Structure formats: C-alpha cells, structure tokens
Amino acid sequence: MDAPTFQPKFLPKQNELGLVAVGFSGGQCKSGVDAAPMALIEHGLVDQLKADLEYNIHYDGVVHDYADLIPAEDPDHRNMKNPRAVSAVTRQLSRQVYEHSRAGRLVLTLGGDHSIAIGTISGTAQATRERLGRDLAVIWVDAHADINTPETSDSGNIHGMPLAFLTGLAAAAEASEPFGWLTPEQRISPAKLVYIGLRDVDRGEKAILRKHGIKAFSMHDIDRHGIGAVMDQALGWIGRDTPVHLSFDVDALDPMWAPSTGTPVRGGLTLREGDFIAECVAQTGCLVALDLVEVNPSLEEQGAAETVRAGVSIVRCALGDTLL
Ligand SMILES: NC(=[NH2+])NCCC[C@H](N)C(=O)O
Ligand SMILES: [Mn+2]
Ligand SMILES: [Mn+2]
C-alpha cells in the first residue's frame, strides 16, 4: 500500500500527523473506554500509519489519563455527572490538540468517550481560525446527536452533550459553567455541523436540531438514498473549501461490527458504509482533525477485537488509505 493519494488543502505539509491518546471515561458511567487507545495502538494502528501510509507521527508516547486533573470531589452540577473532571480534562486536551493543529499537522485523537470532543474540536476550531482565518466544519458520525443541554439530558452523562457546549447552545443557562473556558474562537457554528448515521435522538435533541436547522442524515436517509448520495449531500452542505473535523463515534456502526461500545444501537452502518464515509472525507483533502471514540474493549469482550479492527479501519480510511 502506498502513501495517501489526496492533496491536503489546509495543511502546509503532507503526512505530518499529531497523535493524542486520551484514556478518559468520565463523560459516561462505564469503565473500560479508557483502555481503547492502547488496544488500538497494540492492534498496530500507529505502525500501520507509519509503514503503510507514510505518516510522520508526532506522539508523546503517553495515553493521557489526566489523573492530576481529576478532583476528589465532583458533585453533580445542572444535572451533569463529573462536571469538574470533564471540564478540566477537555480544557487540557484542547491545548494539546491546538498545539498540533497550530503547527499545521493533521490531528488524530483516540478516545475515550465522546465528551473529549469538547477538547478536540475547540482546539482545532481555534487553531484553524488563527492559521487560516476560516471557520471549522464538523462531520459527526454517530448513532446519537450528542447535543443535549444539561437540562434536556435524561442521563446527565456529558458524552451526550458535547455539541451543546461547542455550538454555544448550552451556554445561556446560568453562568456558562463548567465550560465557561470555551471562547467564541473555540466554538463552531450550528450551520457548519453535519450528522451522519443518527438513529437514537432524544426528544429535546430533536427540538434543538429543528430549531437551529442543523443538517442531519439519519439511517433512514441512508436507507433511502444510499451512502453515496448522502455523502455527496453532506459534503455539498459543508462546501468544498472548508476545513473539516471528523468526529467518529464507533457506535455509528451496527453492533454486529462494533459491539464493544457503551451505548450500542441496532440498525446502524455496515463496516463498508463506515469506511466509505471516512474515504469520502479523505478524498476532499479538507480533513484537519479526526477523533475515534467510544471503543470499549471491556464490554461484549468476544467482540472487542472486531470493534478495535473496525476502529483501525476507519482511521486508516480517513487518513487516506485506498482500496486500490
Ligand atoms: N457519545 C455517546 N455515545 N452518547 C450517547 C448519548 C446517549 C443519550 N442521548 C444521552 O444523552 O445520554
Ligand atoms: Mn454514540
Ligand atoms: Mn457520540
């Protein structure tokens, strides 16, 4: 296999990759998702990116657990669980991703639960504005919309809320705690957000999507039009000259292919549809950052190897691997 065939539009150099490994699980209640980065790396992800895709990888060699940032006491706040821990961790992660992105590297973050996107997307958004003077677009591939405000969430798990904070929709209520550290430069516009793969959206989230006219392609849309047409429309909505952050929740895939995840939902993407989404994004040349989240090797253990394999495949495709 050879080096990526796409020409990056928003990166000064081809094949410079910043890697951040995030062993954090505090955005939800199940342990094990923090072990995903090591499982992905042990499966050969980093070696493959170097050997097959010829990336020059900037990696500190650490799976960050941010233990020093986790407070001893973390009472619920506005219905949120672990608010101080998630706030402190994502704030630090935001700086790490920002540094890579500001240096013009493509940034790959391995999670961790999806709350970490508060850190990754804010870091990329800020760096992209500074480096290119452009707004960031986000492609969110997920069974869930993850745009609950603390008030609309039934679970109180922050991994179901990152987009409410990143778009500023959840900032209005009370002071903007605990994510008051997010600056306007670190936020994204709801108009630059596109979802793919949705099939388990909470009532309050549906109201938010409708109210703000947020573009979403559900599994129904994929069934009706096919993944090819959906990708054309999704990328058309964003426009071909916008830097893109792809945030991929492995639970977008059907549990048949990715059973080891905290909130599986039946009726999801096939393995090929997941890879195809990633390939289409790669081909645009607009990708500036990628998250892979919610792989939890300790759930459905017989399926853990399958889930890790699926995750590795998605990352490879998004970073430019091709079938031929
Ligand atoms: N990143 C995820 N897997 N999120 C699942 C969220 C599930 C549900 N909507 C909630 O708010 O709790
Ligand atoms: Mn999800
Ligand atoms: Mn998610």
Image (spheres, helix red, strand yellow):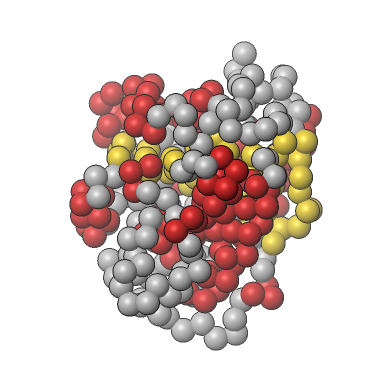
Give the percent coordinates (x, y) of residue 295. 55, 50
When the figure is inspected, residue 17 is found, relative to residue 261, above or below; the finding is above
Q: Evaluate whether residue 61 shows in this view.
A: yes
Q: In the displayed structure, would residue 19 be above or below residue 316? A: below
**263 above or below 137?**
below
Q: Tally the marks.
A: 0
Point out the image quarter for the N terminus: top right
Residue depicted at 58% across the width and 28% down the height? 9
Which residue extends farthest top? 324
Q: Quadrant of residue 63?
A: bottom right
Residue at position x 63%, y 34% from top? 11
Going 53% across and 46% down the picture, which residue do you hit? Answer: 129
Q: Can you say which quadrant of the picture contains the C terminus?
A: top right
Residue at the image point whose x is 50% and y is 38% from the top: 244
Horizontal side of 146 relative to 23 (left or right) equals left
Q: Nearer the viewer, residue 149 or 251?
A: 149
Quick check: can you spot residue 259?
no
Percent x, y of residue 24: 60, 63
Q: Position of residue 128 (x, y in %)?
A: 55, 44
Q: Nearer the viewer, residue 292 or 240?
A: 240
